[in-house]
Amino acid sequence: MLRTVWILLTLLIGQSVLQAQVQGAETFKQLYEELPTPNVYHNAAGGPGHAYWQQKADYQMKIRVDDEKQRIYGEETITYYNNSPDVLTYLWVQLDQNVRAKTSDSYKIRTNKVDDGEMASYELLAMVNKFDGGFNIEHVKGEKGKDLPYVINKTMMRIDLPEALQPKASVTFSIKWWYNVNDGLKTFARSGYEYFPEDKNYMYNIAQFFPRMAVYSEVDGWQNKQFLGRGEFALTFGDYDVEITVPGDHVVAATGELQNAKDVLTKEQLNRLKKAKTADQPVMIITKEEALDNQKDRDTKTTKTWKFRAENVRDFAFASSRKYVWDAQGVPFGNRVVLGMSYYPVEGMPLWDKYSTRAVVQTLKTYSKHTFDYPYPVAISTHCAFTGMEYPMICFNFGRPRSDGSYSARTKYRMIGVIIHEIGHNYFPMIVNSDERQWTWMDEGLNTFLQYLTECEWERNFPSRRGPAHKIVDYMKGDKNGIVPIMTNSESILQFGNNAYGKPATALNILRETVMGRELFDYAFKEYAQRWMFKHPTPADFFRTMEDASGVDLDWFWRGWFYTTDHVDIALKDVKWYKLNTHNTEMEVAEAKKWADENAKGISAIRNEKIIKETVMSKNPELKDKYNDYDPFKATPRMKERDQAILNNLSEDEKALLKKEYHYYEVSLSNIGGLVMPVILEFKYEDGTEEVQYIPAEIWRHNSSEISKVFITEKPLKEMVLDPYLETADTDRSNNYFPERKQPSRFELYNGGRY
């Protein structure tokens, strides 16, 4: 029976070890099955292939802002270039504003409930008073003015071409439309207006305001997934010529360069703008006093048309108000000067005039250092109370002081953070043009990572929300029922901010600081940015480029961090201390005796010395014989003979090793969370010195559950700490110490209900 139990136990242990080894092999398995096969469009190195192509769409638009009815009227002419090898019989156009149509699916699929007898008023009002903010398409016409047939499918419109569009050919058509602008504070939208009842003025932050070409690519064909409100945009590069007609006292900020500055600005404002290009701090283009005059003397009778041109951009947005203060500062890039600018109402002062443009400038400097020189002529931050949102060369940012001009530290840092983040989106995805409708992390995650680097250069100890490894711990150790992998479609993500912003940003920071090192990471990251600027990359292109340019196999990392919901919890399970047997008989026996004298006396011996006054042998000394002289810690001739025989068989190098006073520590580690990571161990010695050893994650390659490793030190160890600098997002620090550290938990003193 005992033999049977032993055999079964041995088999079970063998199966467990084998299973752990298989799991380790799976953890480090290459991503061949997960990633698409390289081809002539996206090559195996992660770059554009030799046959890479992408479409182009140019826009000529005339836009009118109706400040009385809060409407946008527009007419556009689109020239679409088919650079693909495919024949196209129809085109898909995005109608993202239809997400605000009364019949929008975004309302139908929204879940809600009355929670403990309560429901948010804004949610209830949205259900009762559905705002009609969808597009009203007046016509779609071809080149000769003939009506083109079209079908509107919610937030998408298919235009059926009278003749198939051949490869290397183009087609031109026009669309006329209008829509009602939403109150941004009531709808928490990306685009809309804010009304100021004190002076009866509006501030417009307008985006997704025109029918835009969907992307046609070799990866997905037409990207015509419906816009449900979260998954943002997949867009085609092109050139824009846009005329925006507004009330005569409005100031307009927009994507692109202002083409008719002499027509819309005063001579003094033009001089200030010129001065700003070489200034080392923001220069006021429209002052506070001028803005107050504009908003007080409301011009409702005349209009002005502001003309903008933008080349090689994927989108267009603008902001308009008579309330704007405007400042600017130049940022040199070689022989070019980029104007960093901010537009904000007086209500945004003193916060915006102090920090906004400076944050724009620093963002351009930091991001360019890690990617490529900012290629556009302007970078604009406009104030918007209801959103933080990004577009080429312009973004909308929140953050406003109290009415008395004071503000909290939280308001200040959140404003600076959102400006850095939204300006940073010029790089990802406005230039490195990933598909946001499919993969939110490719722009938000990469951008949040660079935001963190910029915040570090802005101020030491900046209260960054995301980036450092320890800030993602609470999310990663949370209930797995509420967590999905990063590689999840944008509309299906749970915990959007943590999944698409925080976790990928943290992953990149861990790659940079711990897995790859700054030099290799920075080179590879910049290579990815420069390979794919003004192009359409996929996740595989990013993964492959980071490996190709660094020479570091990262498939295990992408698999764990991006394809699973595993978390990091590596435990310092045990540490055993060894020393080599020197086979110096006298010394070994003396060491054993010293240890026994210091540690071997148990409680019985201690008490017996006090209680037992005399033993039998002490009472009767005549009973002693030669065996009473036995000393277990005495070196006998036989022991010396055995040790000498062993020494005679050792090489000179082995004998030299025995003479070293080395300490050997067998460290056992357990991977509880499932996500393998590099092992970082801090050795704290008895003499007060410390050292840190970094071991690559490949140590887990043969067993991703349990490993052990022997370390040799010249000094005895006092303490060992796993992940001492919080580099790996380890979710349980309590098992990272040897000897074990205990942190006291607080408890409340209860007085039995007497108060």
Image (tube, rainbow, N blue to C red):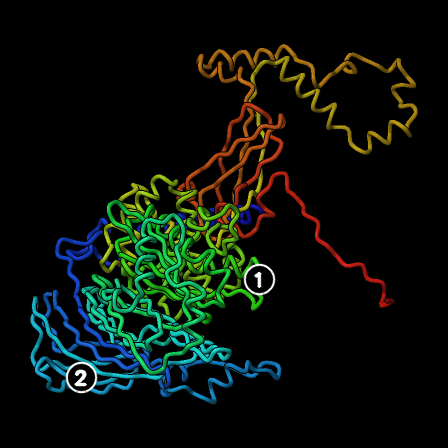
**Residue 34 in view in this figure:** no
Residue located 86% across and 30% down the image: 608
Reading the image, the residue beneath label 1 is 406
Q: Is residue 419 above or below residue 460?
A: below
Which type of secondary structure does the marked residue at label 1 adopt? Answer: loop
Q: Is residue 493 above or below residue 646?
A: below
Residue located 21% across and 85% down the image: 151
Spatial CA span between label 1 and label 2: 51 Å
Q: Residue 282 vs residue 732: left or right?
A: left
Which type of secondary structure does the marked residue at label 2 adopt? Answer: strand
Residue 74, numbered label: none
Find out whether the residues at labels 1 and 2 contact each other: C-beta distance under 8 Å.
Answer: no
Q: Is residue 530 above or below residue 614?
A: below
Q: Going from the N terminus, do you reach mark 1 or mark 2 first?
A: 2
Q: Position of residue 376 (x, y in %)?
A: 26, 56
Residue located 62% across and 25% down the image: 687
Q: Residues within 10 Å of mark 1 (few under 14, many from 20)?
A: few
Amino acid at dot 1 = Ser
Amino acid at dot 2 = Val
Foreground residue among 520 and 57: 57
Q: Residue 755 vs residue 253: left or right?
A: right
Q: Residue 205 vs residue 86: left or right?
A: right
Reading the image, the residue beneath label 2 is 140
Foreground residue among 433 and 722: 433
Question: Of discs 1 and 2, which sits in the foreground?
Answer: 1
Residue located 44% across and 60% down the image: 418
Q: Residue 91 vs residue 475: left or right?
A: left
